[in-house]
Image: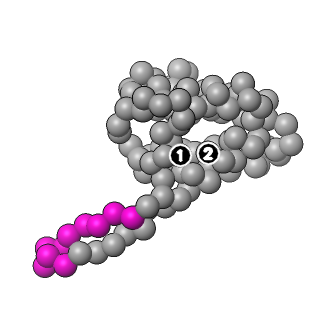
Amino acid sequence: MGRSTSSSSSFASRSGGKSVSRSASGHGKIEAVPVLASQVAKVFKSVLDDEGYQKFKQYVDRFDTHEIPFDGPTGIVTRVERLLVSAPGLSGEDKRQLLDNFIRVVLQHG
């Protein structure tokens, strides 16, 4: 994963677009890159307050630069899960689904 030097989250910026891969026969194959990362980032922005969303972006940036691990008590999953606890207006199931989508995106870009 590349380093992000801007104040915006690289989590959302890595989503979208298309990539071209070559098969053994040399023919190009266009694969759509999922836009799930962008969608998940937008949901986090809408459900967290400004301070929570800034923390979310900071966690993603720190994870991208390998400053924090994926899991464990100090990992990005635990940190994001803690942010979701305080998110008003989301049911427990909605929070779990959002966290699951976040984990899927992190693993896809890992």
Report x, y in % for residue 49: 77, 31
Q: Seen in the image, is 43 located left or right of residue 59?
A: right
Vertical order, 96 against 79 (above or below): below
Q: Seen in the image, is 38 located left or right of residue 16?
A: right
Residue 101 seen in the current view: no
Return the residue found at the far front. 6
**Residue 107 image label:** none
Task: Specify the segment rendered in magenta.
Answer: 18-27
Q: Residue at x 53, y 29 (%)?
A: 7
Q: Residue at x 66, y 48 (%)?
A: 42
Question: Judging from the image, what secondary structure is the residue with disc 2 in?
Answer: helix
- Which part of the image, by quadrant, shows the N terminus? top left
Report x, y in % for residue 21: 25, 67
**The image quarter in which residue 52 lies:** top right
Residue to which mark 1 is pinned:
12
**The image quarter in which residue 17 lies:** bottom left
Report x, y in % for residue 65: 39, 27
- Mark 2 and mark 1 in contact? Answer it, CB < 8 Å: yes
Q: Residue at x 42, y 67 (%)?
A: 32
| Residue 34 vs residue 110, the one in the foreground | 34
Residue to which mark 2 is pinned:
41
The amino acid marked with disc number 2 is: Ala
Return the residue found at the far left. 25
**Figure disc tally:** 2
Q: What's the distance in space between the residues labelled 2 and 1, CA to CA?
A: 6 Å
Vertical order, 33 against 62 (above or below): below
